[in-house]
Amino acid sequence: PTPVLAVVGRPNVGKSTLVNRIIGRREAVVEDRPGVTRDRVSYDANWNGRIFTVVDTGGWDPDAEGLAEAISGQAEVAVSLADAVLFVVDATVGITDTDAAVVKVLRKSGKPVVLAANKVDDMRTEAEAYGLWNLGLGEPYPISALHGRGSGDLLDACLRAL
Ligand code: GDP
Ligand code: MG
């Protein structure tokens, strides 16, 4: 069976933008406003000749009470179906309570996690990304899903984890 990489993280960190970059097509829906309701969506991907499935997640109501619980619940489902997890945070914002709730789920799962520090569009933001070593999830990969910066190294790490 094809290995499955689940992309998780809170709304608006750039998961769908990153999924589009990984699959090389604009199929995942990118929203300027967070929380448009969707189910998990799977796409076929190929990196250096290795075929895998990438699962984009989303589909919660940002105004709902208990957002952190809703998102960590969804992450739990996605992670249970995955061989490895690509956890996306917004390096320009840092770690929120919602991110912390997802981290708990990831730790509990025991699945391999690759940490993407997104929205590092230029050198200036790179320092914020290195602060994410604190999460205890290993090396943070500074990337710009929007511009493609760092995505090759990130994908290499994802394939090592799969
Ligand atoms: P999702 O909710 O996590 O799937 O996030 P989206 O992929 O829908 O992106 C949310 C917003 O962040 C959109 O306006 C994107 O254009 C923007 N975004 C995504 N990646 C980057 C990035 O690397 N840099 C910047 N500056 N903006 C980004
Ligand atoms: Mg999305």
Image (cartoon, rainbow, N blue to C red):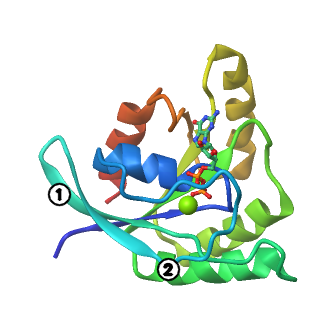
Kind of element beneath mark 1:
strand
Most extreme residue toward the top, as rendered?
Answer: 123
Q: Residue at 83% x, 56% y: name it.
A: 96
Closer to the chain start, of discs 2 and 1, is: 2
Q: Circle 1: is it few (<14), some (14-19), or many (20+) Cα within 10 Å?
A: some
Q: Residue at 68% x, 64% y: name it.
A: 103
Viewport quadrant of the N terminus: bottom left
Q: In the image, what residue type sits under mark 2?
A: Asp
Q: Residue at 36% x, 57% y: name it.
A: 27
Across and down, in percent, residue 91 comes to 71, 38
* Image quadrant where residue 157 sits: top left
Residue behind mark 1: 51
Across and down, in percent, residue 159 comes to 30, 50
Q: Residue at 52% x, 69% y: name it.
A: 57
Kind of element beneath mark 2:
loop
Residue 39 is marked as 2
